Structures are given as structure tokens and as C-alpha cells.
Image (cartoon, rainbow, N blue to C red):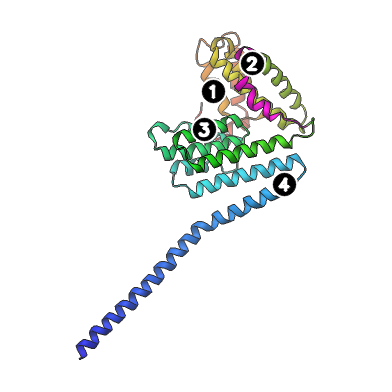
Amino acid sequence: MVEKNLKNNTGFFGKTKSKIAGFFKRKNSNSEVNIESKPIIVIEKEIKKHQENIALKKDIKTKYEIRKQILKLLLKKKAILSENSYIKKAYGFLNNYSEDNIYEAINYIKNLPLDRLSSKYNNELYRFQALLYELVEEFSESSKSYKDALKAINDEETLQEFKSFMERYQELLKWQKDIDEKIILDQLYNVHNTTPIEKLPKSVAMLENLALYYARSPKSRPIGKRYFKEVLKIYKKLYEYDPKKYSCDYVRVLLEGVERFMLTTLLLKEAQKILADPQSCIEQRVYLSQKLKDLRDKSFVKKSKIFKGSF
């Protein structure tokens, strides 16, 4: 009888112990879910708040700033949710979201051995890269990144993100009301994609003059910067088409982008690579080499993370 009671008690305590263990396991599991999901919930609430706020604002500069905050939050959300270690490392470059740091993250992704990574990793990296390009307003590169992501995995999630990007881009176009602030984003997006190669020198000369005109005033300087980024893309295309003819022009605008518009110091690395070829830019080699050396000695270049180890 005593033995029977002991057996029953053992069974009772065993069941009770099992229930208690199960309770704490569920509790810990729920806690882990809450810990992991809470930042995402906060981010999504912030994004929604910014989206509602942007519709109420009239000032275009304020709209641009809010738009940037949304993109930063989207990048943060991806970094938290992703199990891709490359995404997390790329996000680690964005400690203060300076243009230099954004390009450093882009450069890091571009130099990954993507051909050796899984389709899933490639898809995630291209989508992350697309947001980085959008943050620095390189819309054609952003669009290309989404298309590369779709080549890796053509799924609903990627298509939806591409659609959201295009909607944000179209929204930017609608903001351009005042002719003095007009950025002509649609022209910038299409000029080097649709203009015949033989007409590009004329187009780029016009854009460069506009960029330098707007750069004269602090108020219009951001517009000039956007134009000059397009200048860089067009000269790169011309250089790739005819390196001998356009190497000096391309190096010149690469250096000017850093000197006048404080663009990423990756441009200096590219200029140095071209000048390292003895057959490139023979006519202005001495002048441009000296200008590159002078820029490398500037304090703002020396402080750049990209600069360290780049030369």
C-alpha cells in the first residue's frame, strides 16, 4: 500500500514538475519573441508616423529629411530581421549615415563574392544595396539593384519592395513644384540611360554647368550636388566607351566631386586607379596627379574611413 502511494506520488510530482518546466519554457520562449519583435514593432510604428507626417508637410526640404528617416528605419529593420551576416556587417558601416559611410557599405557589398553566395543571400544583399543607393539618391543604381535581386529570387516580397521604391520615386517627382527648386529627377534618372552615346558629351556639359551654377549658393547646393552625381555617371559611361578620349575628363570630375561637393573618397581611389595606367590621361597627368595628392592631404579626406587603407 505504502509502495503504491509512493508510486502515485512519484507520478504526481513528475507530472507537476513537467508542467512547471513547460510553463517556464513557454514563458522564456514568449519573452524571447517579445525581446526580438519589440524593436521591429517600434520601427514599424516610427515608419508609419513618418509616412503620415510627410503627407502633412509642405516644405520640400522637410519632406526630404523625413524621407531619409524612413529609409534609415527600413535599413535598420532589415539588419535586425536578417540572419545574413553580410547584411549586419554592411549595416555596421552606417554609424552616422554620412555619405562616405553609406558608400563604404555599398562598396563592401559590391566587393563580396556574390557568385559564391546562395540566391537567398544575393537577393537580400541586393535589396539592402538598393535602399543604400536610394538614400544617396542614385535612383538608377537602386532600380538596377532591385532587378538584380529579382534575378536571384523572383518572389512577392522583392516585387513589393521594388514597387514601394518606384512609388517613393514618383512621389519625389510630385514634390517638384517651384521652378527654382526643381531637380528634374526624371531627366536625371533617364538621361544616361536613353540618350545616344554620341549626344552624351553635350548633355554632360549642360549638366555640369548647371551643377556648378547651383553650387554657388548654400541654399541651392544640394541641387547642384544631385546634378553633379549625374555628371559623374555620364563621364563614367563615356570613359568606358572610349577610355583614351575621356580618361582626363573622368578623372577631373572624380576629383572635383570630392573637392567641391564633398562626395565619397572612393572617387579618389577610382581616380588613382586610372592615373596608375601610363596610357591614360597623358595630356593632363601631371596636373591631375598633383591635384589628387593635394586632396589626399586634406583633413576631411584623412578622416574618412574609406581613405584609410585605400591608397
- Main SS, magenta region, reads helix
The residue shown at (60%, 41%) is: 164
Residue 163 appears in the figure: yes
Q: What amino acid type is highlighted by mark number 1?
A: Glu
Label 1 vs label 3, nearer the camera: 3
Q: Left of 308 or right of it: where is 177?
A: right
Tell me, yes or no, whether the two marked residues, 1 and 2, touch with CB atoms within 8 Å: no
The alpha-carbon separation of the residues under discs 1 and 3 comes to 25 Å
Residue 307 appears in the figure: no
Residue beneath label 4, please?
A: 55
Q: Which residues are magenta?
A: 181-199
Label 3 vs label 2, nearer the camera: 3
Q: What amino acid type is highlighted by mark number 2?
A: Leu
The alpha-carbon separation of the residues under discs 1 and 2 comes to 21 Å
Residue beneath label 1, please?
A: 270
Residue 190 coordinates in the image, percent (x, y) = 63, 25
Q: What amino acid type is highlighted by mark number 3?
A: Lys
Q: Which mark is residue 199?
A: none
Mark 3 falls on what kind of element?
A: helix
- Residue 196 shown in magenta: yes
Q: Left of 254 or right of it: where is 14?
A: left
Residue beneath label 3, please?
A: 147
Mark closer to the chain start, 4 or 1 = 4
Residue beneath label 2, please?
A: 200
The alpha-carbon separation of the residues under discs 3 and 2 comes to 25 Å
